[in-house]
Amino acid sequence: MESDPNPPAGSPAQFQTTRWSLIVRARGEGGVARAALEALCRAYWFPLYAFARRNGASRHDAEDLTQAFFSHVLATDFIARAEPEKGRFRSFLLASLRNFMAKEHARESAQKRGGGARPVDFDENAAEERLGLTAGRAELTPSEHFERDWALALLEQALDRLGAEQRAMGRAELFARLRPLLRAGPERGDYEALSIELGINRSTLTVTVHRLQQRYRELVRAEILQTVADADDLEDEMRHLLAILQT
């Protein structure tokens, strides 16, 4: 049986050839490359913003620096310098941000840095709330925080993809109620309470959550495959990210 040449968005088949694919697509020209590059920026702006904040930048300076960095990424051949054999893409991205910050004056205005442009639209207040969730981990260096923020951003990306799949199947409201269970795991009494609230018997609810958890794991792996050089690196990267999240 031949595979579908145009698998549905978010389907397992769509992720079978995604090794380093987002970065590769972003190297090209035209709308596809631009969309891939913007997808990278949208997906991982928070770890970069948080890194700038943890290196002493004010929230406004960190936003300016992050937006300026993305303006630089989108306007230059930056992505062409990312090579799979040189290691993890996030390490390349962080090193590039460090270099960019070293060349920028922390007090420069947004007008001087990027002409006031916002190449990536993000909620600064929401970013500060997220930053506060990990601010108490004083034992971690800014680079270690970046690794952890990257891992958390990757998990959120996978959850967003799962949410898009569920919306396409008409299950948006159900997924919205079950999403917290996928992110943090169910607590004692959660299934009973949700069973009553949603009008679903407990066994059906348990099976539904289990299937969502399985698909979530598949999508996490798919996200990782987008930024590793080879499928053989997947398991090492999975172990690495799990270790980061346990710090």
Image (cartoon, grey):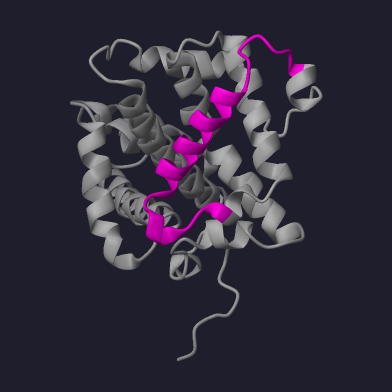
Please state the horizontal and vertical placement of residue 234, each as a whole percent of the image: 29, 59
Quadrant, the N terminus: bottom left
Given residues 233 and 216, the one toward you in this image is 233
In this rendering, would 26 be left or right of 194? right
- Can residue 202 be seen from the camera position used here? no
Residue located at (39% from left, 55% from top): 86
The spot of residue 112 in percent (x, y) is 78, 19
Is residue 104 on the magenta stretch?
Answer: yes
Residue placed most toward the observer, 2 or 190: 2
Q: Is residue 20 positioned above or below 118 on the image?
A: below
Q: Which residues are magenta?
A: 81-110
Would you identify the image quadrant in which residue 195 lies? top left
Residue 5 is drawn in which quadrant?
bottom right
In the rendered view, tell whether residue 167 sits above or below residue 59.
Answer: below
Does residue 48 appear left or right of residue 233 in this picture? right
* Residue at x-position 40% and y-position 42%: 91
Q: Position of residue 224 (x, y in %)?
A: 38, 53
Q: Tell me where residue 117 sits by quadrant.
A: top right
Would you place residue 206 above or below residue 180 in this image?
Answer: below
